[in-house]
Amino acid sequence: MGDDNFAPVLSKSARKNRKNKYFRPEKTIEDYVAIFERKHEVLQNSKFTTHLKKVLYKLIPQHDRSNITHIRCLAIGQPTEADAVIYQASILALLQDWFSVKGSHVSVWDPIINDKDREFFVKVMGITISEDDFKDIDPTKILWYAPHAPISVMESLLRDKKTSPKYFLANFIPDYETRLLTKDLNSKYPGLKEAIELSTQLSLSSLEEWNEADNLVSQGCVVISPSEELTKVEKAMAEIKIDDRVDIENVSSESLTLGKTMVSYEINKFSENKDRDACGNLGALDGKWNCIKLDEKLSDDEVWRLAVNDLGVHVWVS
């Protein structure tokens, strides 16, 4: 009688090997280094990175960029559990590089971070982990990054005006107006509600021709370039360097030449039109958020692959 109908008897080790046919060994720190490097290269070559750098450099003047010494990152998630988080960590690495912030001044926190995640942030990225950090640092020296942070985190950051961010890369604030009920905004999220009301939405297209002079004007100051045809008022101020700031309220209504492009504006017109928006309309002179959504002009594939949907850059100007 043949044994075709009988299941073969496997040894204990053979049964174990068959059971673990699809077993994947736990990733080592070297594995995460390789994964991070691959995804970082993809991110660096993406249109998103081009947009992000352009927005940051347009909205934040060079003088203010050089003043940023710390980066605080919240709600980033677990890089050892999700590829999307590694992309978000890669964005953090780009920010660190662009603003020349040393690793000890880059701090991340998310309550779900485990020991493997800690190893990734500390050993792979060379940054620190802290639940409560940079409390004593001037807010103008901190760039905040909170990718896809829960609404409770957004509210806690925006409610206290003394410590709230000046430079904030996070969920696009104006979008919350359509995502939340008015009664919830009023009762549960007053900080976010006020931020929405004080938001000036800009577009990537509007930044194309926006130069350094326009940027400084939008923040309530002017840059003066010496010229052969200066008025008496201008001559008195001719020693002011290109990057020096002048309070608009204390400047004569005489026409001054702004920026390296030598574009002339009437100062009295600025003071009379403070409620206009930025980028050609000069906006946010009284204290508002200038906001740009980063997924504009990106393909759906890139937006979701890099997990950058809904992200926006927010800069407080006063």
Image (cartoon, helix red, strand yellow):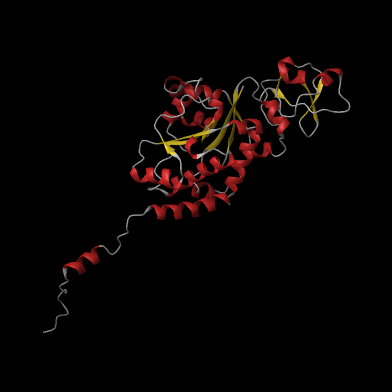
Q: How many marks?
A: 0
Residue 244 in percent (x, y) is at 71, 25
The image quarter in which residue 279 lies: top right
Residue 160 seen in the current view? yes
Please report the residue visible at 79 percent of the width from the left and 20 percent of the height from the top. 237
Please report the residue visible at 41 percent of the width from the left and 46 percent of the height from the top. 120
Q: Is residue 126 left or right of residue 22?
A: right
Residue 219 in percent (x, y) is at 66, 25
In this orientation, which residue lies closer to the viewer: 1 or 308? 308
Quarter of the image where the C terminus is located: top right
The image quarter in which residue 221 lies: top right
Q: Is residue 18 left or right of residue 168?
A: left
Residue 86 in percent (x, y) is at 45, 47
Please report the residue visible at 83 percent of the width from the left and 17 percent of the height from the top. 233
Quarter of the image where the N terminus is located: bottom left
Residue 282 seen in the current view? no
On screen, residue 242 above or below 77: above
Taking the view exactly as shown, the residue that stands out farthest to the right is 229
On screen, residue 235 above or below 80: above
Residue 215 in percent (x, y) is at 68, 30
Q: Is residue 119 left or right of residue 168?
A: left
Taking the view exactly as shown, the residue that stands out farthest to the left is 1
